[in-house]
Image (cartoon, helix red, strand yellow):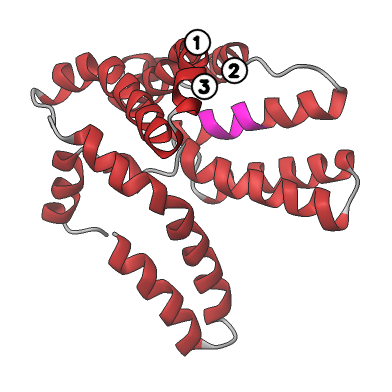
């Protein structure tokens, strides 16, 4: 129900991915729930089971769009790796999630959402070894190093997805890297305030509205 002009503003700024329930949201919710349960409530294996069930139900609740299905399946792979004591391999998890999606909907292979979702995560995964080599340089420079690392991550995703964006939309946002650097640090606050505000509004509408206003102003 977002107005078309507002949606276009997000897309042209290069932060349209905030409107899609994808890896950023799923990882915040899933990892947050897992580490909370693991730290305060349950054993590691029981926390894995509860979190996996939550992720699958959450994906079903959202209708399992492609980006959500990819992120949920990859996170489930990561949690099952912890459950079995195995190492998590992001490329293998990405490939498995892609295979499962294409077995269900083969024509997704030619859809913009599918291609963008997988090229974005591939950009992060494939560029991470390069980041590992540069990490000592980043760490030696304190806050400046962290900023450089954030720029590198954002730039890697931008460069890898740029051909896909040009192919489907015929335009790119040259300041998308800077826009994401401003917005992404606020995403955890946005998702947390949104979830907490929604739950709180069932019991205390005014307080819930206060937290949801934080989400409104961030967006």
First along the sequence among labels 2 and 3: 2
Q: Residues within 10 Å of mark 2 (few under 14, many from 20)?
A: some
Look at the image and tell me in which quarter the N terminus lies. bottom left
Q: Which residues are magenta?
A: 70-75
Q: Residues within 10 Å of mark 3 (few under 14, many from 20)?
A: some
Residue that appears at 49% across and 80% down = 208
Is residue 215 found left or right of 135 in the rendered image?
A: left
Is residue 49 found left or right of 24 in the rendered image?
A: right
Q: Residues within 10 Å of mark 1 (few under 14, many from 20)?
A: few
Give the percent coordinates (x, y) of residue 187. 42, 51
Q: CA distance from mark 2 to mark 3?
A: 16 Å
Give the percent coordinates (x, y) of residue 108. 38, 20
Residue toward you, 12 or 36 = 36
Q: Which residue is mark 1?
A: 133
Q: Which residue is mark 3?
A: 101
Could you say whether the residue bearing mark 3 is in a helix, strand or loop? Answer: helix
Give the percent coordinates (x, y) of residue 141. 43, 30
Q: CA distance from mark 3 to mark 1?
A: 33 Å
Question: Number of numbered discs present?
Answer: 3
Give the percent coordinates (x, y) of residue 143. 42, 39
As displayed, is residue 62 above or below residue 141? Answer: below
First along the sequence among labels 3 and 1: 3
Look at the image and tell me in which quarter the C terminus lies. bottom left
Q: CA distance from mark 2 to mark 1?
A: 18 Å
- Which mark identifies residue 90? 2
Could you say whether the residue bearing mark 1 is in a helix, strand or loop? Answer: helix
In the displayed orientation, state which residue is furthest to the right.
Answer: 43
129 is within the stretch colored magenta:
no
Residue that appears at 50% across and 10% down = 133
73 is within the stretch colored magenta:
yes
As displayed, is residue 195 above or below residue 211? Answer: above
Tell me which corner region of the image, top left, top right, bottom left or bottom right, holds residue 199: bottom right
């Amino acid at each position: 129900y977002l107005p078309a002009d507002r949606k276009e503003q997000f897309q042209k700024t290069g932060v349209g991915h905030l409107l899609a329930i994808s890896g950023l949201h799923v990882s915040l919710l899933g990892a947050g729930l897992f580490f909370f349960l693991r730290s305060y409530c349950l054993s590691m294996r029981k926390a894995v089971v509860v979190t996996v069930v939550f992720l699958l139900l959450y994906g079903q609740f959202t209708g399992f769009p492609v980006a959500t299905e990819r992120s949920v399946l990859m996170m489930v792979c990561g949690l099952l790796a912890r459950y079995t004591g195995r190492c998590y391999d992001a490329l293998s998890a990405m490939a498995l999630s892609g295979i499962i999606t294409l077995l269900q909907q083969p024509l997704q292979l030619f859809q913009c959402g599918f291609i963008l979702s997988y090229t974005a995560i591939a950009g992060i995964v494939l560029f991470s070894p390069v980041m590992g080599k540069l990490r000592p340089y980043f760490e030696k420079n304190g806050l400046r190093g962290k900023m450089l690392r954030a720029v590198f991550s954002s730039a890697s995703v931008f460069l890898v997805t740029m051909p896909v964006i040009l192919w489907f939309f015929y335009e790119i946002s040259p300041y998308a890297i800077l826009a994401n650097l401003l917005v992404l640090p606020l995403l955890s606050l946005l998702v947390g305030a949104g979830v907490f505000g929604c739950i709180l509004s069932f019991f205390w509408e005014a307080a819930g509205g206060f937290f949801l206003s934080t989400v409104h102003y961030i967006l």
